Image: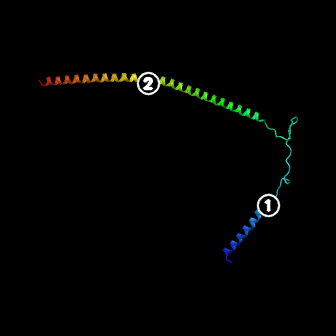
Amino acid sequence: MNFKNQLSAIVGIAIVFGSAQWSARAGDATRITKADRPERPAKPTTPGATVSTDKPDRPSLSEVKDAVKSFQDQKREFIRQQREQRKLSTDDARSKVREELQAAKGTLDTTRQELKDAIEAAKRQALEQARKLAEEAREAAKEGKRGKE
């Protein structure tokens, strides 16, 4: 036999024995019955409490419904309060921004008026300088004519 045949024979045997072992373990697990399991200890009781052994200690359906209704009412109230608080905080923020804008508008109006006044003053000054330059040019022209005569 060559090496490949030996290797495949060994792997085949290992698979057969492995699957046999798995089935044995599976069989062991299914053999455990309720009788083989240990019994659970009894639930501890508090002194003075009456515990019914036939029914578990659960609240009645009406108690559960009342608790759910109470929770829903509290949730609605909480959400309403959150909305009011959010509305008030946005109103406060808006009023604060409005006040800042009004203050900025007042300074903007005064700045705008100052700029207009400065532009008018610059125009007057430019006209005055142009008039003076024109007057000087006329005088220079007159002097030039007088100098030629």
* Label 2: which secondary element: helix
Q: Quadrant of the N terminus?
A: bottom right
Residue 63 placement, left or right of 38: left
Q: Quadrant of the C terminus?
A: top left
Q: CA distance from mark 1 to mark 2?
A: 92 Å
Residue 90 placement, left or right of 148: right
Q: Hey, which quadrant is residue 107 in on the image?
A: top left
Q: Residue at x 66, y 74 (%)?
A: 4
Decide: few, some or many residues near mark 2? Use Cα within 10 Å; few <14, some 14-19, many ≥20.
few
Residue 32 placement, left or right of 110: right
Instruction: Give the residue furthest to the left.
Output: 149
Disc on res. 27: 1
Q: Amino acid at mark 2?
A: Leu
Q: Amino acid at mark 1?
A: Gly
Q: Hey, which quadrant is residue 32 in on the image?
A: bottom right
**Relative depth, front residue between 114 and 84:** 84
Query: Label 2: which residue?
Result: 108
Q: Residue at x 28, y 23 (%)?
A: 127
**Relative depth, front residue between 147 and 96:** 96
Residue 110, image x and y in percent?
Answer: 42, 21
